[in-house]
Amino acid sequence: MTAQDPAPPPRRDRAIHELVHDPYRMRAKPSGPAACPSCGAVYEAGRWQWKKAAAPGAEDVTCPACLRIRDRVPAGEITLSGGFLKQHREDIEALVRHTEEAEKAEHPLNRIMDMEWRGGKLEITTTDIHVARRIGHALYAAYRGTLRYRQPAEDYHIRVTWDREA
């Protein structure tokens, strides 16, 4: 290029990359009211909510949480371990369930997918990163211990580990 050549026009074909990639995020809003046939959550006013009944003529749309549960693709993984966990198993399970219920009451997409004991550890999977984070915070607030979060910057996924010995 010489000094007399005009600058090339700016490129307009660049891909726009999401900051956080969540394959279960709805790409487009339903055209009107919708209801999830699996869990009964209702999509109205731009968000999923718990209602007694969907509006007449509501479209059947499976919510992102039910899709994750069906596909077994958690957004959050929580691992609890340590001697304290074994001694207070029932109390900790109750705290985890209570925390999920409080989160789910306001945010229907934030649910526990599975809770399973494996080799002395309690492994929990969730449909959203926020409920996993909230469970970790509730455990730490109630029982202290060691709490760690690991969340890749580009993925909609979080790993929470909590440990406490006696």
Image: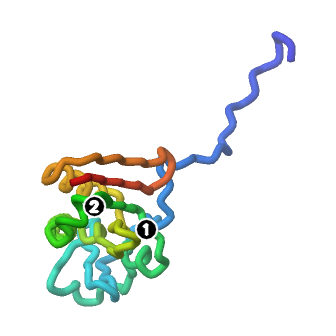
Answer above or below: position of 134 versus 12.
Answer: below
Residue farthest to the right, as pictured:
1
Q: Secondary structure at mark 2?
A: helix
Residue 122, labelled with which disc? none
**Front-most of 156 and 164?**
164
| Tag 2 and tag 1, C-beta contact below 8 Å | no
- On the rendered image, what quadrant is the N terminus found in? top right
Q: Which mark is residue 74?
A: 1
State the SS at label 1: loop
* Image quadrant in which you'd find residue 9: top right
Q: CA distance from mark 2 to mark 1?
A: 11 Å
Callout 2: few (<14), some (14-19), or many (20+) C-alpha neighbours within 10 Å? many
Can you give x and y, in whole percent of width and height, for residue 136 in the image? 26, 54
Front in this rendered view, residue 22 or 74: 74
- Residue 44 visible (yes or no): yes
Q: Quadrant of residue 11?
A: top right
Query: What residue do we see at 23% from left, 48% from top?
Result: 145
Chain-order first, disc 2 or disc 1: 1
Residue sitting at 35 percent across and 66 percent down? Answer: 121
Q: Position of residue 93 (x, y in %)?
A: 20, 70
Residue placed under numbered mark 2 in the picture? 131
Q: Amino acid at mark 2?
A: Val
Residue in the picture at 35% in, 85% down? 59
Q: Nearer the viewer, residue 83 or 9?
A: 83
User: Residue 17 location, x and y as percent?
Assistant: 56, 47
Q: Position of residue 50 (x, y in %)?
A: 19, 76
The residue drawn where x is 47% and y is 71% is 73
One can see residue 124 in this view: no
Above or below, 57 relative to 13: below
Q: Bin the neighbour count of mark 1 within 10 Å (Cα to Cα): few under 14, some 14-19, many 20 and up.
A: many
Q: Quadrant of the C terminus?
A: bottom left
Q: In the drawing, does residue 109 fall left or right of residue 74?
A: left
